Amino acid sequence: MIRFIEDQDEKRRISREVLEALKEWFEVDESREQYIRESADQPFWAAFENDVPAGFLCLKETGRETMELAVMGVKKDFHRHGFGRRLFAAAKDYAAQKGYDFIQVKTVRTGMYEDYDITNAFYKSLGFKELEVLEEYWDAANPCQIYVMSLKSVIGTIDTRHSYRGKFISEPVPREDLIAIANAGISAPSGCNKQTTDLVVVDDPETLDKIKALIDPPVAQTAPAMIVVLTRRINAYRDRCFAVQDYSAAIENMLLAIVELGYQSCWYEGHITDDDRICDKIAEVLGVPDEYDVVCVLPVGKAEEDFHAPSKKSFGERVRFNHFGKE
Ligand SMILES: Cc1cc2nc3c(=O)[nH]c(=O)nc-3n(C[C@H](O)[C@H](O)[C@H](O)COP(=O)(O)O)c2cc1C
């Protein structure tokens, strides 16, 4: 279990317990004490197994667009339990949600010590890329390898996109951002390139209010903009209609563009296409012609509240290589 820790004494206690158990990496008393002291003021996540701290991770801001993985440790008994990855996933989510573009981490470069070779391999497996080695940053026996990761790569954005159902701040979304998001939507693939998905971008406060008033139970009531997704159920060939696939691809492209630009959203389809047909009422307000159906609304805005990734099945439960049943 991963927990975001806010209490400073608890942070100091956990970081001490973990770092003192990892003397191979944190042998110099002075720098270990500094990590412990500084951890109290940093965003801090701890991993627990049966309420016992197994590891922790802290971030610190090193530039307007960059967070550093300031320190991370997992006790040896808990190595290979997936704690390091889960700690990092939580920290990466946090940095992306706060609008940072990069995460960097420093370690002793590969080829010096076996323990650090493992650390290097771990960072690479998380997706970090080698930025530079600074030979004298610490001292000649400990050349400093700097790794960097972009939080705005496609895969980084996929990792940090989650449905956001909280309140939005009231700041309007600039037209250029709405255009970029809508453009991502209409750039999606479509069966036989039939381009069956159209969009109505709503940023006029009066029209937004009319749409919000139709959504019952209310959702996205504070969103400063919404993208309404329309589909035309025409056949791609013979009797094959790919309209659902087409608009799904468009929606996912837009969700990723929304997150990449620092906003949040949620795919509201079930909510508006149920028996009460809120979608048809939205279509009427927007003057949508009969041959189109409204299928989804995507609120767009900056999140006011914290939020977390929902729990999902593990990779191994859903992905197999080469055969469904055998290794
Ligand atoms: C076809 C479809 C319809 C959805 N409809 C709704 C909806 O009406 N209301 C809602 O709150 N979330 C809706 N969602 C969002 C899912 O609940 C959400 O994607 C899922 O719980 C996984 O969470 P994640 O998006 O954070 O990964 C919908 C998602 C899809 C793909």
Image (cartoon, rainbow, N blue to C red):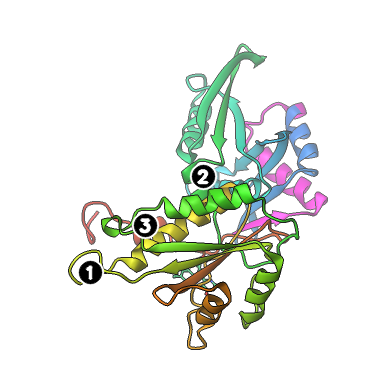
Q: Nearer the viewer, residue 221 or 327?
A: 221
Q: Which SS class for mark 1?
A: loop
Which quadrant of the figure has residue 136?
top right
Mark 1 vs mark 3: which is more N-terminal?
1
Q: Earlier in the sequence, mark 2 or mark 3?
A: 2
Where is mark 3, residue-wise? 316
Q: Residue 133 is drawn in which quadrant?
A: top right
Q: Which residue is mark 2?
A: 156
Q: Residue furthest bottom?
A: 275
x and y percentages locating residue 110 in the rendered image: 49, 23
Q: Nearer the viewer, mark 2 or mark 1?
A: 1
Q: Which residues are magenta?
A: 1-30
Label 2 is placed on what type of residue? Gly
Q: Secondary structure at mark 3?
A: helix
Expressed as whole percent of the image width and height from the top left, the position of residue 58 reads 69, 42
Q: Which residue is mark 1?
A: 240
Q: Secondary structure at mark 2?
A: helix
In percent of width and height, residue 282 lies at: 55, 77
- Establish if 212 lies above or below 18: below
Closer to the observer: label 2 or label 3? 2
Q: Is residue 12 magenta?
A: yes
Label 2 to label 1: alpha-carbon separation: 34 Å
Which part of the image, by quadrant, shows the N terminus?
bottom right
